[in-house]
Image: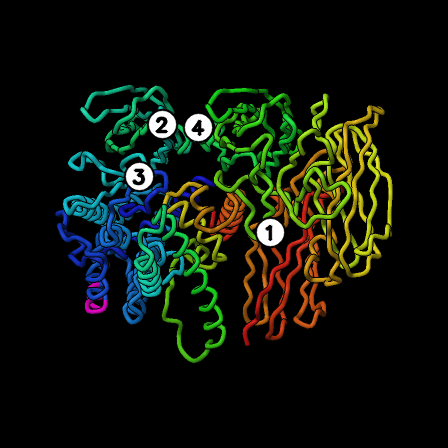
Amino acid sequence: MKNLLEDQIRQVFELQEAAMTTIDDPKPADETSISNTTDKAGLDDKADLDDKANVDDKANVLPLLNATSVSESKWRGVATDRLDRASSARSIMAIAAAVLVGLMAVGGLAAVNGSSDVADSTVAAGDSAQDDSAQDNDAQAESAQDDGADQVDSATVVQPASDGDASQSFPQRAASVSIKVGADSMAFKSVTYIPAVVDVSIVDSSGAEVTSTSIETDERGFFTWSTRGLAAGDYDLVLEPEAADGSADRFLVSKDPFTIDGQAVANEEFDDYTVNVNERGEVFPPSPPAGVYINPGNGTVSVMAATNGETNVAITVIDSAGAQVASDSVATDVGGSFRWSTSGLASGTYTMVLTPTAKDGSTGRHLTGRHTFTIGGAAPATASTGSTDTDTPTTSPATSTTINRQTTTVPADDSTKSDDSKTEDSVTKPGDKNEYGYPQKAGAVSIKTGTDSVSIKSTTYIPAVVAIAIVNSSGSQISSATVSTNSAGFFNWSANGLAPGNYSFTLDPKAADGTPGRFFASTEPFTIDGQEVANEEFDDYTVNVNEDGEVYPPSPPAGVYINPGNGTVSVDAATNGEANVAITIIDSAGTQVASGNVATDVWGSFRWSTSGLASGTYTMVLTPTAKDGSTGRHLTGRHTFTIEG
Amino acid sequence: MSTKVPNTTLELDRLDQTFDDFFSSAWPWARRLAAFLVQDQTAGEDIAQQALTKMADGWGSHDNPEAYLRRSLTNASNNWHRHNNVRRAKLPLLVEQDSVDFAANELADALAALPFRQRAVLVFRYYADLSEADIARALDCAPGTVKSLASRALDTLSKEIPR
């Protein structure tokens, strides 16, 4: 059913595009020769449209309708009426609609399904226009290339003379060929939309075939392939599909160029990229590990990160000379998160390569992530960049190393004084090394402040007992506590009732097993400004470690789309996992004017709307809580919108 | 499908490409894409022209001009869609709506009625044949959001059309 629907959607777009193309290059609809008219950047199109749309719309579309084998006046009347409206509005969209009305009146959805004679004829009619437009555009591409444009089309036709069966509604060649290149490798994915067997070959610049294979697509036509060992140079990827059911002439040969430049870093992540469709035909968004937090210090590096689903993660550490100095493989927890550390690294700059693979063997779910860090010396910022963009969580390889918010660590000699300077990595001062290789202080201290509260979370990496003290700006201790970490060293603590002002807190860990000398105290400054709005999202933030010790990258609802209009506002967003979301709307005076509570779907997405809002500016507060009661998985998001008067 | 939106991964070295070259190659698909996004050809052309005009000013600064253009078109289309909704709401009885009407059958009706981002995902996926990553880039959202938007859209459409 889904595939049928997808085909129908494509049909709608194709018909609409056919109508647009008809207006682009006005000519009789029954003209079958290839037009050599080049789309001159569309400027001429617009003039043509303005001048001729009223006339040519009908001239071009009515013959299409006449081409069908049924002549009921009923649908013709409807279609003509639609055409009249379309002409008056000069909207080609309406023309496509009129065509569809005619088609639907004749054959109902069967026209789209292609399951009747009538349907066949209507599809052929649509394809006639479509083929014309395709040829026109191929001509455009050739023209552009003749003009010297360095154009790469995603669906380059190399055998336009091949007689594809015009009655077929399938693409005449493998579509959407996506190519990824590495230092000596290439991978691609594509789709034929129907089951097919695809002969794949790679041809070098001299025309010699370098390698070839034959691939069976999945039931939806998706297929992928990769190869290694390619020398630097220019190549063509040649795809020659044949329908799996043996029907002939459904496809043309396609040829797409790519270049291997021998540069390892530029597209390295694609070396391990295979496909975003697994063996079951499921499409996964490939992603590198996200929320990567790397904590280098004193010869030891630790990584905490999360993947998109269950995975095993291969970790390698490479020094600046490219030599592998450490490697391991870890299994993620049920949330896709993992932790790993290694020690004994000399001072220098390293790259950590994280290569996840799905536990179930499905491919294409993950991309490789690469993260640079420095051991010793003045370490540059690496992983924890303190992103505050609540609307756009990091997803791309280029920006995937962000997660911890307001994560700060203090210089090693700050155990006795406050220092406003903040560095992203734990850097121990000379002489602080000990024999255990553990961080010398609590690492990755994340601070969240509320109206009158502060919450902190951190880790000592090993079980420890941490003495925490809060000192105000005059040096007076106003609160203290002792907390025990969990088995992985994670701990969190919060205090409230703080008056506005500047504070600092001291963390003084002791190893739980009594081993002395593993830690020294660290101090972090923070400010309570009493402003409810400024840090509102942290009021509900607890910790990113749940009761089972699992680490979740806390995140606010992502992809938030708020659509205000006419007193109504709707929100469409997604959370990081299953959640219930409390929604409140606050007006500019701070008064709550609406609220709701929604449960997300299995993807963590949700929708909600309310109406009756007066003109003005509002803030929508989205507060997710995990359905399973685990804490720290989500942050509150705040979004301002305006209801126009 | 005759004119495809270029796939990001295929956009190889175009350092030598002039804006005129880019305009020539991008205009056909840009105006179609915008037209499908806003369901209005004239508005789509305006949006595409404005986006390309802005790109001309900063030509040379875009690492991936096609992806940049897709993103610009999406944002501009979204803004147009939003303001058009307001305009329509304010002028319900004065004039007959002259723009768009893809509304010809249940499926086209349902497509036109989808929320903008859901429709955009379908346009990118089934018209432009973009990967989820490229769609996410164009919509400025996570790939998972693309998946959920598409799922919702298909779910809505499957309920709207007759079996």
| SS category of the residue bearing label 2 | strand
Q: Is residue A384 above or below residue B28?
A: above
Query: Observer-nearest residue: A13 or B11?
Result: B11
Asked whether, in this view, residue B119 is left or right of residue A172, the answer is right
Give the residue drawn at x 68%, y 40%. Answer: A411
Q: Nearer the viewer, mark 1 or mark 2?
A: 1
Give the residue drawn at x 28%, y 35%. Answer: A173
The x and y percentages for residue B54 are 34, 61
Say which quarter of the image contains residue A497: bottom right
Q: Do callouts 3 and 1 mark residues in contact (Cβ within 8 Å)?
A: no
> What number is the disc on residue B12?
3
The x and y percentages for residue A397 are 49, 38
Chain of the residue where label 3 is placed in the rendered structure: B
Q: Nearer the viewer, mark 2 or mark 4?
A: 2
| SS category of the residue bearing label 4 | loop
**To which residue does mark 4 refer?**
A274
Where are the magenta residues, as a range?
Answer: A50-56
